Structure formats: structure tokens, C-alpha cells
Amino acid sequence: MDPKGPLIATLTAIGINLVNTLVGYFVARKAFGKELNVFLSMVFGSLGVRAIAVIASAWFCLSVAEMHQVGFALTFAVMGFVMLMGEILFFHRWFEKNKREVRRPVTELLKKNASPLNALLITP
């Protein structure tokens, strides 16, 4: 296998994007449930650090390691888009799941204030 061939460049681009997404996933999982300021600083802080790391590794692969440029660039762009969509879907689904768990039906809220009037309103 040629170390400067398109296969190595493609696998390296996939690996960089996969590691980037996994780190983002673990940081997001750790940040959920924390206060808003802590959550935002963890997510956006990791986003900045991950962006710098990805840019530095792409620069290293293309200029220092002299990998196959077309194979690396196309795979890196496509996988970056796919992994970013996966991250966004994860955030969306996780947020919706947590929102459903926190939100309670009105009938449950009325049961807490047990009074005869509430009992009449709750029962059909």
C-alpha cells in the first residue's frame, strides 16, 4: 500500500472526522444537564478546540505528509458534512427527549393542588 496513495488519504480523512465527531458527542453528553452557561461554554469551547485540531491535522496531512490531495479533500469535505449532520441530529433528538421528560401534562399539575374543584376538572 502506497502511503501517499488515495486509499490512505481517504481513510485518514474519515478517521479525522470520526474522532472529531466522537469527541463532540462525549463532550455534549457530559454537558447535558448542566447550567446553561456551563453547557454553552463546554459545547462551544470544545467546538473551537476541535476546529483548531481538525484544521491543524488537515494541514499536516496535506502539506507535511503530502497525502493524495483530491482523495483527502473530497473525503474530508463529504465526511465532515455527514458527521456534522449526525451531530446536529443527536443534539435535536436529545433535546426533544429531555423536553418531553421535563414537560408534564396539565392534569398532573392540577393533581398536585388537590382540592374538590381540581378533582371536578380532572375527572371527565
Image (cartoon, rainbow, N blue to C red):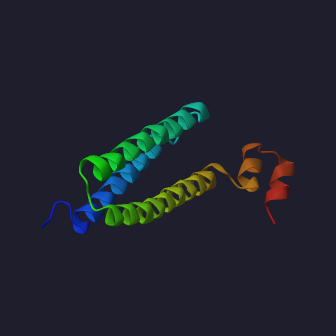
Task: Name the quadrant of the C terminus.
Answer: bottom right
Horizontal side of residue 83 vs 16, given as left or right: right
Task: Name the quadrant of the N terminus.
Answer: bottom left
What residue sits 25% from the left and 67% below the top? 6
On the image, the x and y values in percent for residue 55 come to 40, 45
> From the viewer's perspective, is residue 120 above or below residue 40?
below
Toward the viewer: 108 or 56?
A: 56
What residue sits 80% from the left and 53% below the top? 119
Residue 34 shows in the view: no
Extreme residue toward the right, this view:
117
On the image, the x and y values in percent for residue 14 come to 32, 61
> From the viewer's perspective, is residue 27 above or below residue 108?
above
On the image, the x and y values in percent for residue 69 come to 33, 61
| Quarter where residue 7 is shown | bottom left
Extreme residue toward the left, this view:
1
What residue sits 43% from the left and 47% below the top? 24
On the image, the x and y values in percent for residue 21 come to 40, 53
